[in-house]
Amino acid sequence: MAETDEFGEELADFVRRVAELKSARSVPADELPTVLDAAIFELDHVADQLWPRFQRLSSDGPSGIASTDRQEQQLLKALFQRVPVPVALVDRETVVRRLNFAAASFTGVRAGYATGRPLTGFLAHADRAAFRSQAAAVARGDGDRSLTVHLQQQPSAPVRATLTALRPSGEPRSAVLVVLQPADSRVPSGANTPGPAPNLTETTRHTVLMDLVDAMTTTLLSAPGEGRSAVPERAAEVLHERFADWVVVDTGAARLSRTTVLGPSDTTGPPGAPGLSDTPGPSVIQGPSEGRRPSAYAEVVAALAAQDPAACPLVVEAARGGSTALQVRPEDPDVFGRDTSGDPFLVRANVTSLLCVPLTTASGPVRGVLTLFRSGGRLAFSMAEAQAMDMMSRHIALAMARLN
């Protein structure tokens, strides 16, 4: 019992030190690295000292202190959640086991959503392979590592990730403790770190979707008889920027052909219809997007317009199976194919979520495929939005069939 009392006193001291670290976030910026070092030291203390002692007391102690041990275990879990430094516990495959509150605020990803998913899925595509390699090295005992990565929702802000091995009690393999911090070494706080993406209420989201469905229906019913190919083009104009950053339309039954590519744009564009080109082939919008050179997006749009849909696995699968595909932070960067230089289109377009919808009626053939991309910090497509898009795709297919 004396050892248990001593452990309780040491744990209480640790709690007080954590409280002091929280209050120290208001110190001058040049002193913040010292505070961060102290916070990481306290994390090491929990992993190397307090947790092994707790496990030993739990296994060797008398049954009379089982209730106290459970309370202390709950306290340790609460401490992990409340530590004022973004921390994640992952396995050697980078799958998230735990994500504390500070890490959820820092990354903009809810802990419940992140658990069970690879942490690399929230990083920029270019950083994923390096992070996996370093995490595997740490897990197999090659020593601690540190590298600079970029969050997919904020690719312009470099993040320093520090990885250290941790052996959970009773488990045969080591886990990896990941500490995240801005690359300038400032301790993240609620005032200067990105918070979670705004979450609209269900009522508001439903209203926005109904407005979109109404706009689509009005467009389809009022469109002049310009031919079947004009229907998906006008539908793409309704969805572009209002619902998706990128809209790609492929039409055809026996063989798909790319007819429309709309990308992030400003008020300028090629001559002709607003934002559309008069040249034969796919209609495109070429314009700059925030944080990217105008010529860079023009190149992506042109490359997408020139792509053969048969070389796009996602489009081929949608046309063959006739089912909607929804992907958030796509794990496979090649799912939409590569350009002529070998670069994945999803990486070049900075795609964070996508919808691929076949244009088909309940009993008719697939008349085309509509693909929507969202990029940057925009909210990912939701299941409700995918269902609404599935309904609109059937309306588009009916309008195309009417003009046969």
Image (cartoon, grey):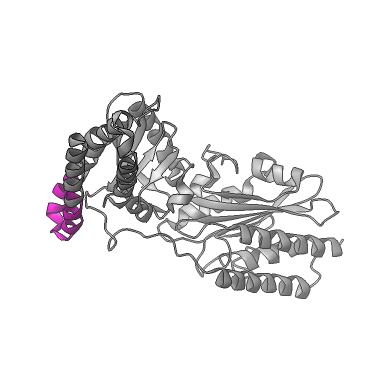
Q: Which residues are magenta?
A: 17-38
Pick out the residue farthest to the front: 64
Displayed quadrant of residue 332: top right
Q: Is residue 34 above or below residue 274?
A: above
Quadrant holding the N terminus: top left
Q: Position of residue 229 (x, y in %)?
A: 76, 60
* Residue ID at (41%, 31%): 92
Nearest the viewer among 360 and 164 is 164
Quadrant holding the C terminus: bottom right
Residue 305 visible at all:
yes
Count of numbered circles on the image: 0
Q: Is residue 153 left or right of residue 258?
A: left
Q: Is residue 118 above or below residue 239?
A: above
Q: Position of residue 169 (x, y in %)?
A: 35, 30
Q: Is residue 258 above or below residue 207?
A: above
Q: Is residue 37 above or below residue 240?
A: above
Displayed quadrant of residue 52: top left
Nearest the viewer among 94 and 130 is 94
Nearest the viewer among 17 and 318 is 17
Q: Position of residue 77 (x, y in %)?
A: 34, 45
**Does 31 appear in magenta?**
yes
Displayed quadrant of residue 51: top left
Main secondary structure of the magenta stretch = helix
**Does 102 appear in magenta?**
no
* Residue ID at (38%, 53%): 104
Q: Is residue 17 left or right of residue 225?
A: left
Q: Position of residue 296 (x, y in %)?
A: 47, 52
* Residue ID at (31%, 58%): 193
Residue 403 visible at all:
no
